[in-house]
Amino acid sequence: MKKNESYDEFIKGIWRDNPVFVQVLGMCPMLAVTNSAINAIAMGMATFFVLVGSSFLVSSFRAWIPKQVRISCFIIIIATFVTVADYTLLALVPKVHKELGAFIPLIVANCMILGRQEAFSSRYPVRLAVLDAMGMASGFLLALFSLGAIREILGDGALFGISLFGENFEPWVIMILPPGGFLTLGIILLFFNWFRLKKDEFLADVAEAERGGN
Amino acid sequence: MNAAAPSSLRLVLTLAIAGLVSGVAIIGIYESTLPTITANKARELREAVFKVLPGVSAMQQFAYRGGELVVAWELAKDEKAVYGGYDDEGGFVGYAIPGAGPGFQDTIGLLYGYTPEKNLVLGMEILESRETPGLGDKIYKDADFVGGFGALSIEPEIVAVKKGTSSRPNEIDAITGATISSKAVVRIINETHAEWLQKLPPPGAEPPLAESAGSGAQP
């Protein structure tokens, strides 16, 4: 039972409560930096680090943080992790940092992160909070990567900067421009909602059949 | 609420401690990454200088002080620098001059190589730009455009013309679909050049390569 519970906290962020495709949070970095797969992964990793780190601290100190100043405390903790991520990226991968530009400091304002602290980490024990954060951050990373990969393949004819289709491919430039982000995200959301609808119908059918069988 | 409201002192203390710990953490990460970041920037600049001045193996930084160009590794605030490139024998090859100006979306920062002896631009490298991906970013991705700045006359100034129509030595083909960005690059070079031309010493009177400069390893 216990094992199932932790598994569920982790997996819900990836699929059932995916922060991007289901909760539709964190749209700003989602649309802004997914013009290539590598940028999307860098952004996803930075967010992962910030979310897991902040969730760990918030959950550890949840007994000491007075309710009245909790949001300020969350923001201080998140901002510290963001600054650490910002300088680390600048030192290790200056090229990627240049591409992401202002969007790294803007992770502070990613409502998915503050939302997880308020809704989960400040109420649950450390182990569950970290699992939840890892699940949510992986879901976010996965969403960023799928969008980044689709847009780079269509808009640049490449993946991770490696050309896929050779010389004759005419890149669909609009896909790596901002409208391409909206188009791709819209189509993915359409798929997710269609899938959910089908699943609900299927479950209803199964229930119906079982009742009929009895 | 079953617990009594905490005193203001406790609220202030919580935030003060959180702020203090956060401040220490930020100073720590800043101090520990600073050397790497500075070294990265210096290496990027060095690579760019070597790229825009073919055949160069050493460089030094100049500043314009008291009416002449002097070797200066430390710059005052807001002071602009140019870089001198030297070949294996220590002979002067040309200047690498940084310039910046408005592009289509944001500031374009670039570096261009210039030889006063032949009055030619030898190369151009974009250092920073936020031009439109797929269109404006061709100012550094399009090999034809970047290559066009090798041995380009800057007398009286560079002119960007429609693709395929450049005929004079000071004309360069603009990029189709990125005319504004290409013209911005040309304009930045022209403006920077007009600003520096008066300050550069006559050809042959360039400061020699300082002993300590060696391979130009200094920042």
Image: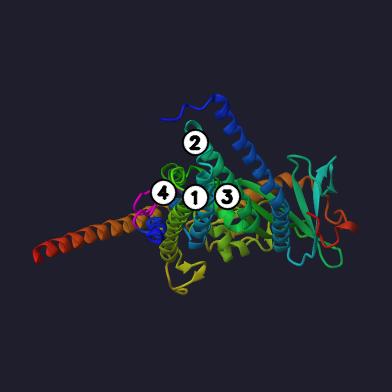
- Mark 2 and mark 4 residues within 8 Å of each other at the beta carbon: no
Which residue is tagged 2? A70
Q: Amino acid under label 4?
A: Met
Disc number placed over residue B184 in the picture, else none: 3
According to the picture, the residue beneath numbered tag 4 turns out to be A27
Quick check: is A11 in the magenta stretch? no
In the rendering, which numbered label is found on residue B89? none
Badge 4 marks a residue whose secondary structure is: helix
Q: Crowding at label 3, few (<14), some or many (≥20) Cα neighbours within 10 Å?
A: many
The reply to whether label 1 and label 2 mark residues of one chain is: yes
Name the residue type under label 2: Arg
Q: Amino acid at mark 1?
A: Val
Mark 3 or mark 2: which is in front? 2
Circle 3: residue type = Ala
Q: Chain of mark 1?
A: A
Q: Position of residue A159 (x, y in %)?
A: 48, 68
Q: Residue at x 20, y 61 (%)?
A: A203
Q: Position of residue A110 (x, y in %)?
A: 47, 45
Residue at the spot of label 1: A126
**Gap between marks 3 and 2, in whole Å?**
49 Å
Specify start and end residues of the magenta stretch as a single range. Answer: A16-28
Q: With A12 as the anchor, is B50 left or right in this view?
A: right
